Image: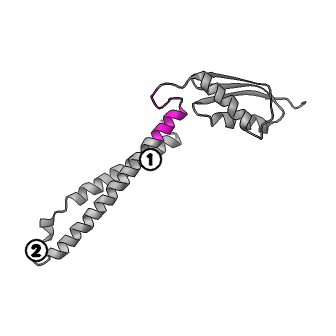
Amino acid sequence: MKLSNEERDILYHLVIAIIFGCALMLLGGCDKRMLTDGSGQQKADGLIDSRNAAVDQIATKINQASGDTKEAVEFTSERRGINSEGAPLDDASITQSVKAALRRDPRLTPVNLDVATVNGEVTLKGEVTSSELRMRMENVVASVTGVVKVNNFIRINWNQ
């Protein structure tokens, strides 16, 4: 099974959280009674304070990693055509967003282009004057939220 970049990032954050959790458990096993021998009470207290500070830092990093992971999961779901409530994005909305994104790009000249969306899969049909324009259109469409795949059937008309 091949993982996308977003899925690899999520997995990375989870592994980091597990490592920090293990370190937290190991540090939690240190006990003040084990460190004192009667004469080293002040040294033991200092070590415990250091350990508590380290535990706090680890806990903070785990919270940050879990927050990053949640954002990555939400981003991945959104890119796959699922809104924040878990429902699929509407194909008509995706089509309108695609057309708006193509109009906003200053490098794209107005062309007669058909755009159709089915289950987040966008199909492009039409003609352009260069392969650069064709690829630019595909890249713009692929960046639109909810687009899960782009079928680029745009032809290049060298005679225009």
> Does the CB distance between marks 1 and 2 fall below 8 Å?
no
Please tell me which residue lies in front, 10 or 114: 114
- For the point 27% across and 68% down, the residue is 50
- For the point 57% across and 30% down, the residue is 146
Magenta region, residue range: 72-86
- For the point 23% across and 70% down, the residue is 47
**Most distant residue in the bottom direction:** 39
Q: Regarding mark 2 in the picture, which secondary structure is present there?
A: loop
Please tell me which residue lies in front, 149 or 50: 50
Mark 2: give few (<14), some (14-19) or many (20+) Cα within 10 Å: few
Residue 58 placement (x, y as % from top left): 33, 57
Badge 2 amino acid: Asp
Residue 1 placement (x, y as % from top left): 48, 35
Query: Can you tell which quarter of the image residue 123 is in?
Result: top right
Instruction: Indicate the quadrant containing the C terminus: top left, top right, bottom left or bottom right.
Output: top right
Numbered tag placed on residue 37 in the rendering: 2
- CA distance separating discs 1 and 2: 44 Å
Residue 27 placement (x, y as % from top left): 24, 60
Q: Is residue 109 visible to us here?
A: yes
In the displayed structure, 132 sits above or below 98; it is below
Residue 80 placement (x, y as % from top left): 53, 31
Nearest-to-viewer mark from 1 and 2: 1
Query: Can you tell which quarter of the image residue 158 is in?
Result: top right
Residue matched to label 1? 68
Give the mark nearer the N terminus: 1 vs 2: 2
Q: Let me know if residue 84 is in the magenta part.
A: yes
Q: Let me know if residue 56 is in the magenta part.
A: no
